[in-house]
């Protein structure tokens, strides 16, 4: 079965600093990969997804993620963090060739200092 | 376009009581999902409906949880009787259909506390 690991429970950055959230997956083939954001009291919102093709994926709100097959990773990045980016971020994996339903990691809480 | 609606937003009950959650998906979305999100974890799929039929309920604890989507639109999730470990946020999501990729849209969730 596929699984996804987010090794960082919390990440703290200063506003304007760059951000990288780590995600590693376990799956035999190339999975579908997702990043979601969850603001307090709100549902999850899809930031970006990777199915195939260009391994650098652009998403909404200035986020991007890079799929690295050799490292089984799909890290999320943003060059300059805004205070409004403070939220919970979830990496998720879905089975290629079949289910698009994501299996979620445990999440990384992003704290932004002014 | 209205999003996925859920009610209530918060519910506090005592163990062994019953509780029900309601979800109204985005208009025209054939597929509806219920997720359980325990504090400190990612959401876990409980059940998936395609119109009014169940596609996947393999992770639904059927001894106490039930869900229905009788007219293929809104849905209810019930827990009877509740246990302490059922304390979680219950998220509803919908998508156009599960065939080709269609983005899931999530509601704000119902936070359940079981005392």
Image (tube, coloured by chain):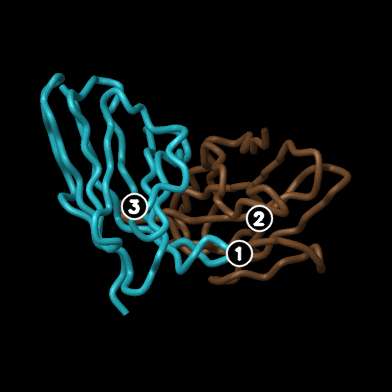
Chain colours: A brown, B cyan
Q: Is residue A1 left or right of residue B34?
A: right
- Please say if the residues under marks 2 and 3 sit with CB atoms less than 8 Å apart: no
Label 3 lies in what chain? B
Among the two numbered marks 1 and 2 on one chain, the one whose residue lies closer to the N terminus: 1
State the residue position of label 2. A76
Camera-near label (3 vs 1) is 3
- Give me the chain letter of mark 2: A
Up-down relation of residue A27 to residue A78 (above or below): above
> Is mark 1 in CB contact (under 8 Å) with mark 2?
yes
**Looking at the image, is A103 positioned above or below residue B99?**
above
What secondary structure is marked by label 1? strand
Near-viewer residue (B97 or B113): B97
SS type, badge 3: strand
Q: Nearer the viewer, residue A108 or A45?
A: A45
- Between the C-alphas of marks 3 and 1, the distance is 20 Å
Which residue lies under the disc numbered 3? B92
- Circle 1: is it few (<14), some (14-19), or many (20+) Cα within 10 Å? some
Residue indicated by mark 1: A48
Circle count: 3
- Could you confirm whether marks 2 and 3 are on the same chain? no
Which quadrant of the figure has residue B90?
top left
Q: Quadrant of residue B60?
A: top left
Q: Is residue B107 left or right of residue B31?
A: left
Mark 3 Cα within 10 Å, few/some/many (few <14, many 20+)?
Answer: many
Residue at 31% from the left image edge and 73% from the top image edge: B27
């Amino acid at each position: 079965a596929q699984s996804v690991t987010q090794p960082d429970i919390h990440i703290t950055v200063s506003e304007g600093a760059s951000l990288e959230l780590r995600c590693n997956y376990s799956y035999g083939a190339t999975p579908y990969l997702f990043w979601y954001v969850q603001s307090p009291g709100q549902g999850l919102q899809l930031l970006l997804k990777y199915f195939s093709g260009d391994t650098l994926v652009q998403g909404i709100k200035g986020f991007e993620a890079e799929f690295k097959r050799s490292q089984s990773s799909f890290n999320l990045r943003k060059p300059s963090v805004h205070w409004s980016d403070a939220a919970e971020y979830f990496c998720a994996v879905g089975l290629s060739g079949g289910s698009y339903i994501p299996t979620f990691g445990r999440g990384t809480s992003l704290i932004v200092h002014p | 376009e209205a999003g996925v609606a859920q009610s209530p937003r918060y519910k506090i009950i005592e163990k062994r009581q019953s509780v029900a959650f309601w979800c109204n998906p985005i208009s025209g979305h054939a597929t509806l999902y219920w997720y359980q999100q325990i504090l400190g974890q990612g959401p876990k799929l409980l059940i998936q409906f395609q119109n009014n039929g169940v596609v996947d309920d393999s992770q639904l604890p059927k001894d106490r949880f039930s869900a229905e989507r009788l007219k293929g639109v809104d849905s209810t999730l019930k827990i009877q009787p509740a246990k302490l470990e059922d304390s979680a946020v219950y998220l509803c999501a919908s998508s156009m259909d599960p065939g080709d990729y269609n983005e899931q849209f999530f509601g704000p969730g119902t936070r359940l506390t079981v005392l």
